[in-house]
Image (tube, rainbow, N blue to C red):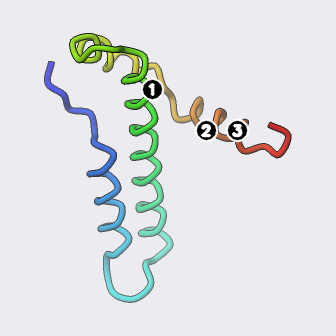
């Protein structure tokens, strides 16, 4: 199966490009698209890094990474981030 997962660096580059659309200060809609794209990049960075840490060899990563990464959800990662940023954590 071909590797079609978004690359976090490519997504961040796109987010910077989106933020620079137009002249002057970006509109709220453009800012929202840029933030959403950078959030998507962060999601894929965390999912990919976690999957890579779980499997030692490249063959294992290729075999199981996609299935492992599909197990991640944006809500699940947001909940973890919220728990880690609490003052009482």
Tell me whether the residue at label 1 lies in contact with that at label 3, contact meaning CB atoms closer than 8 angstroms. no
Residue 49 vs 25, above or below: the answer is above
Rendered image quadrant of residue 58: top left
SS at circle 2: helix
User: Crowding near pointer 2: few (<14 within 10 Å), some, many (20+)?
Assistant: few
- The image's mark for residue 67 is none
State the separation of the CA atoms marked 1 and 2. Answer: 15 Å
Q: Which tag, 2 or 3, sits closer to the chain's start?
A: 2
Residue 79 vs 70, above or below: the answer is below
Query: Which of these two is toward me, 33 or 84?
Result: 84
Tell me whether the residue at label 2 lies in contact with that at label 3, contact meaning CB atoms closer than 8 angstroms. no
User: Crowding near pointer 3: few (<14 within 10 Å), some, many (20+)?
Assistant: few
Rendered image quadrant of residue 86: top right
Q: Which tag, 1 or 2, sits closer to the chain's start?
A: 1
The residue to which callout 1 is attached is: 50
**Residue displayed at 70% across by 38% down:** 84
State the separation of the CA atoms marked 1 and 3. Answer: 16 Å
Q: Residue 85, percent across and down? A: 72, 44
Residue 74 appears left or right of 38: right
Residue 8 vs 5, above or below: the answer is below
- The image's mark for residue 84 is 3
Q: Residue 28, percent across and down? A: 50, 72
Residue 23 appears left or right of 75: left
Tell me whether the residue at label 1 lies in contact with that at label 2, contact meaning CB atoms closer than 8 angstroms. no
The residue to which callout 2 is attached is: 78
**Residue displayed at 33% across by 87% down:** 23
Q: How many marks?
A: 3
């Amino acid at each position: 199966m071909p590797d079609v997962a978004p690359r976090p660096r490519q997504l961040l580059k796109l987010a910077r490009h989106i933020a620079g659309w137009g002249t002057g200060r970006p509109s709220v809609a453009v800012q929202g698209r840029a933030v959403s794209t950078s959030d998507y990049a962060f999601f894929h960075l965390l999912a990919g890094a976690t999957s890579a840490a779980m499997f030692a060899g490249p063959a294992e990563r290729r075999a199981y990474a996609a299935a492992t990464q599909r197990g991640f959800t944006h809500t699940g990662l947001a909940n973890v981030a919220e728990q880690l940023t609490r003052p009482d954590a």
